[in-house]
Amino acid sequence: MGDYGRISVHDALGGGAVADILLWRNVYGGGVVLIVSTIFWFLFERGGYNIVAFVANNLLLLVVILFFWAKSATLLNRFVYFFYIWLWRLITVVLGF
């Protein structure tokens, strides 16, 4: 019979960093995923919080932070677009563009 047609779980999960985290080969990453998922479970399930309200509140907070950043930058004669460029690079790295 042999190993014909058999594939490891690590290869089935893509064989990269995600597989390492899900299979606890990267203990630090697995711990972070476990803690963050527990916090989200507690926030949404036990706390009775809604995902739409969570996203809306975070977007509102981001808009307020960007507004005050831009206003303080113009008052202090600083470069306004540095934060926007940094935020765009962060988004493109996270989403993989």
Image (cartoon, grey):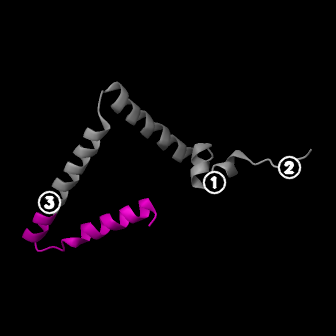
Q: Which quadrant of the figure has residue 76?
A: bottom left
Q: Which quadrant of the figure has residue 57?
A: top left
Magenta segment's dominant SS is: helix
Q: Secondary structure at mark 3?
A: helix
Q: Secondary structure at mark 2?
A: loop
Q: Residues within 10 Å of mark 1 (few under 14, many from 20)?
A: few
Residue drawn at (58%, 54%), measured in percent from left and top?
17
Mark 1 belongs to which amino acid?
Gly
The residue pinned by badge 1 equals: 14
Asked if residue 36 is positioned above or below residue 44 in the image, the reply reads below
The CA distance from mark 3 to mark 1 is 41 Å
Query: Of the residues tagged 3 and 1, which is closer to the observer?
Result: 1
Measuring from the top left, give residue 1's x and y in whole percent.
92, 44
Measuring from the top left, give residue 30's x and y in whole percent.
54, 43
Query: Of the residues tagged 2 and 3, which is closer to the observer?
Result: 2
Task: Give the mark nearer the N terminus: 3 vs 1.
Answer: 1
Task: Give the mark nearer the N terminus: 2 vs 3.
Answer: 2
- Does 61 appear in magenta? no
Measuring from the top left, give residue 49's x and y in whole percent.
29, 31
Residue at the far top in the pictured view: 46
Mark 3 belongs to which amino acid?
Phe
Residue drawn at (31%, 64%), measured in percent from left and top?
87
Asked if residue 47 is positioned above or below residue 59 in the image, the reply reads above
Q: Given contact means CB atoms under 8 Å apart, are the residues at marks 2 and 3 in contact?
A: no
- Does 96 appear in magenta? yes
- Disc assigned to residue 4: 2
Residue drawn at (43%, 60%), measured in percent from left and top?
95
- Disc assigned to residue 67: 3
Q: Which residues are magenta?
A: 70-97
Measuring from the top left, give residue 79's x and y in whole percent.
19, 74
Q: Secondary structure at mark 1?
A: loop
Identify which residue, 46 or 72, lies in the foreground. Answer: 46
